[in-house]
Image (cartoon, rainbow, N blue to C red):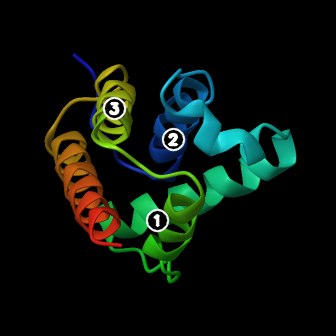
Amino acid sequence: MKKDVSNREDLYLIVKEFYDKLLVDKHLKHFFEKFQEENTLEHHLQTLVDFWDNILFYSGTYNKNAMQPHLLLHQKKPFSKIHFETWLQLFNQSVDDNFEGENASVLKNRALSVATVMRIKTINS
């Protein structure tokens, strides 16, 4: 039996594995070109851990506008249905490969919410 997501280290493992998948995925890698450099990627991963830590554990570690950079990216490289589906599949796989339990389920449900809101906002932009 796998353990549940319980801390920042667990979240880091998830986002690191997730980005390892994103950076090579045929549908998504072109969105993540700027994260190919290790220092840039590591800084971004820490920001993502802050985001998910705040989402899952209400830590107060993230206070930026997560939607804004994605809306700007969408203007340059438009998102489509396959991008959201693949993003969500790879995120869920990164969670499921390592964890199970209530927090893991909450994390995947929140990811679905984030993807849904972002999809609605980019379709209407």
Q: Which residue was labeled with disc 3?
A: 95
Is residue 20 rendered to the left or right of residue 36? left
Tell me where residue 23 sits by quadrant: top right
Question: Could you say whether the residue bearing mark 2 is in a helix, strand or loop?
Answer: helix
Tell me where residue 110 sits by quadrant: bottom left
For label 3, the crowd category at 10 Å Cα-Cα, with few meaning under 14, some 14 to 19 and many 20 or more, is many
Q: Tell me where residue 8 appears, x and y as whole percent.
A: 50, 52
| Three-letter code for the amino acid on which mark 1 is drawn | Phe
* Contact flag, marks 3 and 1 (Cβ < 8 Å): no
Q: Which residue was labeled with disc 2?
A: 15
Q: Look at 23% across and 44% down and name the residue there.
A: 108
Q: Look at 33% across and 74% down and name the residue there.
A: 58
| Three-letter code for the amino acid on which mark 2 is drawn | Val
Quadrant in the picture for the C terminus? bottom left
Question: Could you say whether the residue bearing mark 1 is in a helix, strand or loop?
Answer: helix
Q: Which mark is residue 87?
A: none
- Seen from the viewer's position, the closer of residues 89 and 76 is 76
Q: Which residue was labeled with disc 1?
A: 51
Q: Is residue 79 above or below residue 56?
A: above
Q: Tell me where residue 96 appears, x and y as whole percent.
A: 28, 25
Q: Tell me where residue 16 appears, x and y as whole percent.
A: 58, 36
